[in-house]
Image (cartoon, rainbow, N blue to C red):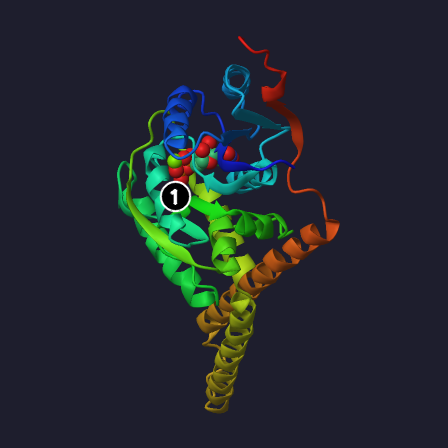
Amino acid sequence: MTRTELSVVVPCFNEEAVLEEFSGRMSRACAAVTRDYEIVFVDDGSSDRTWPMIETLSQNDPRIVGVQLFRNHGHQLAATAGLSIAAGNRVLLIDADLQDPPELLPLMARLMDEGYDVVYGKRIARAGETTFKRLTATVFYRLLNRLSSVAIPEDTGDFRLMSRPVVDILNNMPERHRFIRGMVSWIGGRQAAFPYARDARFAGETKYPLRKMISLAIDALTSFSTKPLRAAVWLGLMSSLFAFAILFYAVFQWSVGNVVPGWASSVVAISFFSGTQLFVMGVFGEYLGRVVQEVKGRPLFTIGKICRKDAMAEIPGD
Ligand code: UDP
Ligand code: MG
């Protein structure tokens, strides 16, 4: 594979409203760094005009590459597909919606010149995001860092510039429930935070509804910690102790002749324990389900089409 200086990977899901603007701003930012760059747009099974727009962009500019997935695989896997195609010595991962300003690229590249392997964007302000989203994010990262042995920086998304060795290692990590920001932290090397203010979405709506946020959070927890399994053991132990206490209480009541009372405590105990058991089984199930999926070893994403205008095919004077 011939290398370019810089690749930009952009997962896009129904982003017709932002693509033109993004492409213009991103191209200018790249040109400020090097002439030898490519922008890889990954269409994650969009149902709007995202793909035809990407095709047009790539026909008009040989530095733009379009990758079409056969269906929606989700943000993390779309990004993974893009990273597998990207040929740059440095790779920028960025969202299409202009929440992460493309103009920061030259500054991030300069920071990387100081000898860093990863420069990740750290949000110091977030425009246009709900208090709910910020609050849940804070709680989630606290919890994740408490459970995981890998330190994953807070207020950080997947917006980051990575060196080729880091991208190669990332591409060789076969896991399918991917939490890219955590995986990059796991890789290590010299990593620098780049503080920036996150803008509001340029147009369109968030493609991360609560359901997808919860799913990403569970993926992160299960792939970066097995402590919930340990917690299940403790929970089981505690509830057994509690059951013993109730047992002694029941025996005591029986010995003093109080046989009938105790209906309420039985019901409470039964529902408490069955709830606990179901919860613990659910935790086991989450891990087991992931084992099953890993064992199947299916490909992580399905690339249907790649379009790029062959720069070599360009006739002089074209
Ligand atoms: N995205 C994707 N596939 C999905 C959901 C989102 O490729 O299934 C892309 C989306 O087009 C955007 C990025 O992932 O470029 C982040 O999504 P979004 O901006 O909607 O998330 P938010 O910033 O609201 O968390
Ligand atoms: Mg966004």
Amino acid at dot 1 = Ala
The percent coordinates of residue 239 (x first, y second) are 51, 75
Residue farthest along the bottom direction in this orientation: 255
Give the residue displayed 65% in from the left and 58% down from the top: 288
On the picture, is 24 further left or further right than 177?
Answer: left
Q: Find residue 278 and report its image quarter.
A: bottom right
**Picture quadrant of ligand 2:** top left
The percent coordinates of residue 285 (x first, y second) are 62, 58
Residue farthest along the right direction in this orientation: 296
Residue farthest along the top direction in this orientation: 317
Q: Foreground: 41 or 89?
A: 89
Give the residue displayed 51% in from the left and 65% down from the top: 271
Q: Find residue 264 and report its image quarter.
A: bottom left
Which quadrant holds the N terminus?
Answer: top right
Give the residue displayed 55% in from the left and 66% down from the top: 226
Q: Which residue is mark 1?
A: 109
**In this rendering, does residue 207 appear at all?**
no
**In this rendering, does residue 143 appear at all?**
yes
On the picture, is 243 further left or further right than 124?
Answer: right
